[in-house]
Structures are given as structure tokens and as C-alpha cells.
Amino acid sequence: VQSTPNHAMLLIGGDFNARVEGKFSYYNSANRNGNFLTDFAYQHNLVVGNTSFQKPRKKLWTWRSPRGTVAQIDFCLYRKRWRNSIKDCQAFNTSNPIGSD
């Protein structure tokens, strides 16, 4: 993150196993990884994109456990300076087309 120039577009997407609070988040409270992720975002002037756009609840979850419970654990981060250029952000909740976990 620090080696990328501030004027450059920076997108970070990943499986963070985090529960993040936000206006449009799946959860009302964060877990430890969620706190780490939001601290990281704050320190590097990033936005957690998944929590910035309103989606139907069925499109918020990104992982289904073997027991059938769902969770939002995959997130997209980008620099705050680009927030007016980003029009939508979503992590998909199916891996069928790509064969991933």
C-alpha cells in the first residue's frame, strides 16, 4: 500500500474473514478481524467498498458454511480519494463459475 503512489488507483480485494460494521453491512457489530480491517483501512486512507453501497440482504453474504449459515467475509478496499469515481462494489456470493472456495 505504501509503495503505491497516492495519486494512483489502488484496489484491494480479498477473503479477510472479517465482520465489518457499516451503513450497508451484513453485520451490526465487528469481530476482531473486522476491527483489524477497519484499522488498516483508516491508517491507509481506504474505504471498505462493500459497506458503501446499498444491496439486498441476499447479495451481502459472500460465504456459506457447511451448516448453511452465511457470512460476509470478502471485502473490496479502495482509496478514499476515488470514492466519487466508484459507482458500485460487490463481492459475489457464488464461486461456481471460477471453482474457488
Image (cartoon, rainbow, N blue to C red):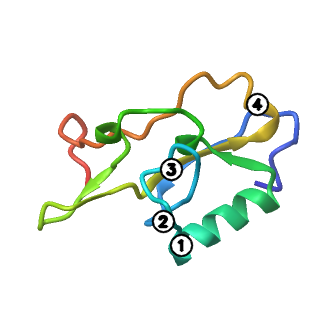
What element does badge 4 sit on? helix
Give me the residue at 20% from left, 45% from top. Answer: 99
Q: Disc 2 to disc 3, how far (Cα)?
A: 8 Å
What element does badge 2 sit on? loop
**Which label is found at residue 75?**
3
Sequence order check, earlier mark of 4 and 1: 1
Reply above or below: 61 against 21.
above
Q: Which amino acid does label 4 sit on?
A: Trp
Residue 21 image point, x, y percent: 56, 58
Residue tagged by mark 4? 82
Name the one closer to the observer, 12 or 27. 27
**Which label is found at residue 70?**
none
Where's the N terminus, which quadrant? bottom right
Q: Disc 1 to disc 3, how far (Cα)?
A: 12 Å
Q: Quadrant of residue 6?
A: top right
Within 10 Å of disc 2 (Cα), the crowding (few <14, some 14-19, many 20+) is many
Sequence order check, earlier mark of 3 and 4: 3
Label 1 with label 2: CB-CB less than 8 Å: yes
Residue tagged by mark 2? 18
Reply above or below: 42 against 58.
below
Within 10 Å of disc 1 (Cα), the crowding (few <14, some 14-19, many 20+) is some
Q: Disc 3 to disc 4, how far (Cα)?
A: 16 Å
Q: Disc 1 to disc 2, how far (Cα)?
A: 5 Å
Label 2 with label 3: CB-CB less than 8 Å: yes
Where's the C terminus, which quadrant? bottom left
Name the one closer to the observer, 74 or 67. 67
What element does badge 3 sit on? strand
Residue tagged by mark 1? 33
